[in-house]
């Protein structure tokens, strides 16, 4: 018990440091959703959802996302209903005042893997698996940091000691992280036939989590472009009117 408490305390301390800065300079990646005209790669986001479901969902929640939101990354209404129905949620009370379980609906949030935070800690040796809904926005370095973290696991270098229950990751501050390597080659079998390497799965899950962090990004960028075009045209009209009004003044 004492050893477990020490491990958890170390994980919390290192986790807090991770929010301040990365242990090693994080490599810059090219993402389809970056830039003024950036958009989400729907195919990659859908593969990322598969990675989340088969690898991450056993520990990490997506509390801010409803099943119906999956329409934004290309899923049909029928597919969303079928996806949601694979999970059960508590509902009620019924006519007799009793709570009951029913298949999830598109209007429900993603079902959490644990009923409460204490159960989540108990199921992970005392370490609390954070919600992933806003993870890309919550970490310094955003998608680049998450991709580096997911692909940065390795054996510790010579002379480096790793505490029991921890894993070595060169991009995590302190290089010791409570989460074991979540991705392994061929851990999932992509429905579109894409080769499931660690690199590919990492890029896909990061793309998916970038979408969960900012599902309205494309709409926001589109509106921004329209506003800039409007201001450009409006400025031109103001200049033309000004010249016309003052044309006879010498």
Image: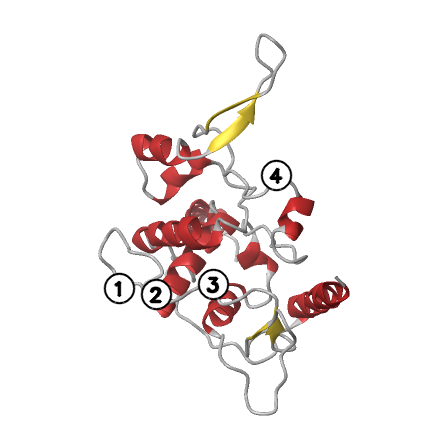
Q: Is residue 223 left or right of residue 23?
A: left
Q: Are marks 4 and 2 in contact (CB under 8 Å)?
A: no
Viewer-proximal residue among 32 and 65: 65
Residue 238 drawn above or below residue 92: below
Q: Is residue 225 left or right of residue 155?
A: left
Q: CA distance from mark 3 to mark 4?
A: 22 Å
* Residue sticking out furthest to the top: 95
Tag in front: 3 or 1: 3
Q: Which mark is residue 200?
A: 2
Quarter assignment of residue 140: bottom right
Q: CA distance from mark 2 to mark 1?
A: 8 Å
Helix, strand or loop at disc 4? loop
Image quarter where the N terminus lies is bottom right
Question: Which is nearer the N-term, disc 4 or disc 1?
Answer: 4
Measured as percent of width and height from the top left, residue 108 is found at 50, 31
Task: For label 1, count other residues whose C-alpha is less than 10 Å away and answer few (under 14), some (14-19) or many (20+).
Answer: some
Q: Which mark is residue 195?
A: 1
């Amino acid at each position: 018990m004492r050893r477990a408490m020490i491990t958890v305390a170390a994980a919390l301390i290192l986790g807090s440091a991770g929010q301040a800065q990365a242990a090693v300079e994080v490599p810059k990646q090219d993402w389809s959703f970056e830039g003024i005209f950036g958009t989400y790669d729907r195919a990659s986001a859908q593969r990322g959802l598969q990675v989340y479901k088969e690898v991450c969902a056993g520990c990490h929640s997506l509390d801010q996302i409803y099943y119906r939101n999956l329409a934004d990354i290309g899923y049909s209404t029928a597919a969303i209903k079928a996806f949601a129905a694979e999970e059960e949620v508590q509902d009620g009370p019924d006519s007799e005042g009793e709570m009951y379980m029913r298949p999830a609906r598109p209007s429900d949030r993603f079902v959490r893997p644990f009923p409460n935070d204490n159960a989540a800690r108990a199921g992970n040796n005392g370490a609390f698996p954070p919600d992933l809904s806003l993870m890309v926005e919550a970490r310094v370095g955003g998608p680049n940091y998450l991709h580096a973290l997911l692909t940065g696991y390795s054996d510790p270098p010579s002379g480096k000691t790793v505490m029991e229950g921890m894993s070595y990751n060169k991009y995590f501050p302190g290089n010791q992280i409570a989460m074991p390597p979540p991705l392994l080659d061929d851990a999932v079998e992509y429905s579109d036939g894409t080769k499931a390497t660690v690199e590919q799965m990492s890029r896909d899950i990061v793309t998916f989590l970038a979408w969960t962090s900012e599902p309205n990004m494309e709409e926001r960028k589109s509106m921004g472009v329209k506003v800039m075009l409007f201001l450009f045209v409006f400025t031109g009209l103001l200049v033309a009117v000004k010249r016309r009004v003052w044309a006879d003044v010498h």
